[in-house]
Amino acid sequence: MAKAKYDKHTFPKLAESYARDGLIEKDIAAKLGVSVATFENYKNKHVEFLESLKRGKAPIDFEVENALLKRALGYDYDEITEEFEGDSTEPTKRKVIRKHVAPDTTAQIFWLKNRKASHWRNNPIFEGEETKKLILELSKETIKNINEQLEKDY
């Protein structure tokens, strides 16, 4: 890939625009005509470039977060159907049906594992002196059981 020289006037604007369109960084790098490694260097060396990426990503990230939250909680919507008679271009009947989309447990799990990782990930992180004591006691008990099993086997 031919290396494009960094242009402080156009690259930040282009990167922001591409990010706002939902492109991932690999695709933004390709659009700018640079490798992913060069793209990473630009982010590290040019503050205005990194900030423009953040500005471009923010609105689409916000939309996706809201969509995930909406899906996790469930929502209601109106389904509108129209009937036409003959060659009429205007509907003769219009029916509005209120529908409900149930909360999605997969979206809930994803949300909780990312937003409340210390409580909801597969191996939760526990904090505090009581927890440390409990872990130490369990570790000692486990070692004792292993030693007893080894003595029986040999």
Image (tube, helix red, strand yellow):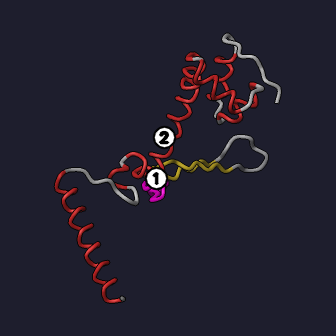
Foreground: 121 or 144?
Answer: 144
**Local secondary structure at mark 2:** helix
Q: Which mark is residue 65?
A: 2
x and y, in percent, of residue 11 in the image:
68, 18
x and y, in percent, of residue 51 in the image:
54, 20
**Which-is-in-front pick, marks 1 and 2?**
1
- Image height check: is 14 above or below 95? above
- For image coordinates 36% across by 89% down, the residue present is 153
**Local secondary structure at mark 1:** helix
Foreground: 82 or 112?
Answer: 112
Res. 105 image quadrant: bottom left
x and y, in percent, of residue 66 in the image:
47, 40
x and y, in percent, of residue 37 in the image:
68, 31
Which quarter shows the C terminus?
bottom left
- Residue occupied by mark 1: 110
Q: Residue furthest front?
A: 154
- Image height check: is 80 above or below 18? below
Hey, what amino acid is under mark 1? Phe
Q: Earlier in the sequence, mark 1 or mark 2?
A: 2
**Number of numbered discs overlaid on the protein picture:** 2
Rate crowding at label 1 as few (under 14), some (14 to 19) or many (20 or more) other CA atoms within 10 Å.
some
Hey, what amino acid is under mark 2? Glu
* Residue 85 shown left or right of residue 133 in the figure: right
Q: Residue furthest right?
A: 2
Q: Which residues are magenta?
A: 99-109
Q: Which mark is residue 6?
A: none
| Alpha carbon distance from label 1 to label 2 | 11 Å
Res. 1 image quadrant: top right
Indicate yes or no whether the magenta region holds residue 103. yes
- Image height check: is 44 above or below 36? above
- For image coordinates 65% across by 30% down, the residue present is 21
